[in-house]
Amino acid sequence: MRHPDTWLKVRPDGLWCEPGGFFIDPVNPVERAVITHAHADHARPGHGAVLASAETLAIMEVRMGAGRAGRTQQALPYGEVLTLGGVRVWLQPAGHVLGSAQVAMEWDGSRAVVSGDYKRVPDPTCLPFEPIPCDVFVTEATFGLPVFRHPPPADEVARLLASVSLFPERTHVVGCYALGKCQRLIRLIREAGWDGPLYLHGALLPVCRAYEALGIPLGDLRPATVAAKAELAGAIVLAPPSAIADRWARRLADPVVCLASGWMRVRQRAKAKGVELPLVISDHCDWDELCRTLVDVDAPEVWVTHGREEALIHAAEAQGRRGRPLRLVGYGDEEEGEDAPPAESPNVAADATA
């Protein structure tokens, strides 16, 4: 048996499975790439052969444009084993966004699992995370501090709808990321009883249409740019976080600025962005979920790729596991993503609400 640290290595381009001859979520163009999900800090253009779930490949095409998501593409269904250079490779759901996957690899008697980004709470737009027992578990730690404990998302949506009822003359504009958060938020709002139209910034529509084509119904969606200002009074408008406080939002009726993100747990983050109604809704694990996952996969060794590495490594070692920070560069910096900690708030623990 050869330990995964002899065949799964950190290279400048990312994690490299040496016997399999492929990178996982490489940050630069490579000849062979396995992609965990379609967020831009994990799925980049210019690769040769790309392996991913069918949903991830479809969303990559929408976001990047035809022909930029790899010269050749191969869709691998969840749970189906493929052998690459003697390495058994398969994908299991990660629960992050539609099509997101963990990459499981077995070679020479040992197993490593690269989780990508993941969450453990139910999401109506994607399959739930499935723990895979392994020898090495590679995990993110975006919200890897004990202060980050996310409330139930249904409770946050209830707060949004209560505000809509309280201010029927105002437009509620909700900042949400184009891939995953937007579609999940739409479904959560629908499940809470809102069956009327939802208005979208144009930048959010292409991925929403892709979700619908992949079997995720989203209901009545309308472009906000063609709606009259009076029509948007009492309405809910979804937009990229960068648009909620700029000139685009001036077309709205006395907007209530909202933002759906795990970082809304940080008071300074909400205040700096002018957010009136922060909604703590995250597509990543909180602290308790990260720690529970380490128990569920029961890996004797945990590698942390990005986020709050030191705290999660300390928690892993307290469970009797070996921890290793990988300090990979290039993840968590997607403009629309929520992976990067707020630059204006270096002391997250001090700034977070109780």
Image (cartoon, rainbow, N blue to C red):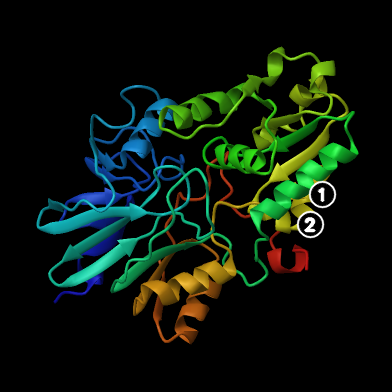
Across and down, in percent, residue 318 comes to 49, 86
Instruction: Find residue 186 and report its image quarter.
Output: top right
Report the front residue among 293 and 203. 293
Identify which amino acid the numbered label 2 is placed on. Arg
Q: Which residue is mark 1?
A: 271
Q: Is residue 5 above or below residue 307?
A: below
Say which amino acid is labelled 1: Lys
Neighbours of disc 1 within 10 Å: few (<14), some (14-19), many (20+): few
* Spot occupied by residue 297 in the image (x, y as percentages of width and height): 37, 72
Question: Against 336, is 317 above or below?
Answer: below
Name the residue nearer the viewer: 227 or 112. 227
Image quadrant where one finds the C terminus:
bottom right
Residue ID at (45%, 53%):
95
State yes or no: discs 1 and 2 in contact (Cβ < 8 Å). yes
Question: Against 222, is 71 above or below?
Answer: below
Residue at 55% from the left image edge and 51% from the top image edge? 283
The residue under label 2 is 267
Alpha-carbon distance for marks 1 and 2?
A: 6 Å
Q: Give the total of numbered labels.
A: 2
In the picture, the quarter occupied by the N terminus is: bottom left
The quadrant in which residue 45 appears is top left
Helix, strand or loop at label 2? It is: helix
Q: Residue 325: horizontal and vertical position, in percent?
A: 43, 69
Residue 41 lies, in percent from the top left, at 46, 44
Q: Is residue 241 left or right of residue 181?
A: right
Q: Is residue 214 above or below residue 12?
A: above
* Residue found at x 62% / y 55%: 341
Q: Is residue 186 left or right of residue 60?
A: right
Q: Which element is circle 1 on?
A: helix
